[in-house]
Image: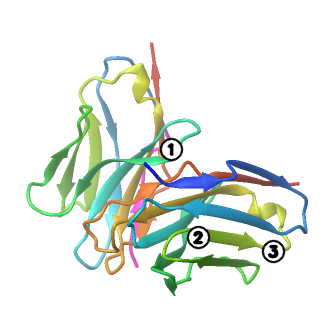
Amino acid sequence: AQSVTQLDSQVPVFEEAPVELRCNYSSSVSVYLFWYVQYPNQGLQLLLKYLSGSTLVESINGFEAEFNKSQTSFHLRKPSVHISDTAEYFCAVNSGGYNKLIFGAGTRLAVHP
Amino acid sequence: GAGVSQSPSNKVTEKGKDVELRCDPISGHTALYWYRQSLGQGLEFLIYFQGNSAPDKSGLPSDRFSAERTGGSVSTLTIQRTQQEDSAVYLCASSLDPGVKNIQYFGAGTRLSVL
């Protein structure tokens, strides 16, 4: 069975500092990996995805994630965070077939001035 | 509509009452998913629809939970005889089709509180 582990439930960081949110997965088949972001009182929004090809994927707002097959990881990084990045971030793997998503427990990123 | 719409946004009910949660997916999206977000359980898959059929109901936690989809569009999740442990945010998502490369778009959710 597939599963996703997000190692940090909360990550506090100061504005303009770099951040890494960790995600590890387990799967016996080819994987498709996603990061979703949930701002307060909003639904989930897709941040970025890995389907195939380049192992480094980027979002439009400066986040990037690297698919590492040997370490079964898909960590999310940003070199300089903003207050507006404060949100909860969910890593997910699809189960194949009809695209059922298996989510990690989430990491709450709190950016302080 | 522009996105996935869920109603109500908040629902407070008494233990033992039935509730209905509605999801209006993006027009033309054939695949629809329900998830539940609760403290301690994270985000859990409940049920998946392709058109009006539900090939996977494996995430429904008990027989008090049911869902239907009509006209390949609107879906309703019904919880009968609600219990306090049903308190959670219920999220609906839709995608163009169930292919693995298709993005799931999520609604803002229905926050259910069972007193």
Q: Do the dots labelled 1 and 3 sit on one chain?
A: no
Residues under numbered marks 1 and 3 in contact, where contact means CB atoms less than 8 Å apart: no
Q: Please indicate whether residue B27 sits to the left or right of residue A78 in the image.
A: right
Residue with the mark numbered 1? A9
Residue with the mark numbered 3? B80
If you read the primary sequence from the N terminus, does the residue marked by circle 3 or circle 2 appear first?
2
Residue with the mark numbered 2? B75
Residue B70: percent from the left, percent from the top? 57, 77
Q: Mark 3 falls on what kind of element?
A: loop
Q: Label 3 crowding class (10 Å Cα cut-off): few <14, some 14-19, many 20+?
A: some
Residue name at image x 89 percent, y 54 percent: B115
| Front-lying residue, A2 or B86 | B86
Residue A102: percent from the left, percent from the top? 43, 66
Residues under numbered marks 1 and 2 in contact, where contact means CB atoms less than 8 Å apart: no
Compared with B65, B24 (above or below) is: above
| Front-lying residue, A10 or A42 | A42
Give the image quarter of residue B57.
bottom right
Q: Which residues are magenta?
A: A1-11
Nearer to us of marks 3 and 2 is 2
| Front-lying residue, A57 or B109 | B109
Q: Chain of mark 3?
A: B
Q: Let me know if residue A4 is in the magenta part.
A: yes
Residue name at image x 76 percent, y 79 percent: B64
Residue name at image x 25 percent, y 69 percent: A31
Q: Identify residue type, mark 2.
A: Ser
- Mark 1–mark 3 distance (CA, rounded to whole Å): 33 Å
Residue A105: percent from the left, percent from the top? 50, 54
- Mark 3–mark 2 distance (CA, rounded to whole Å): 16 Å
Residue name at image x 25 percent, y 79 percent: A29
Q: Mark 1 falls on what kind of element?
A: loop
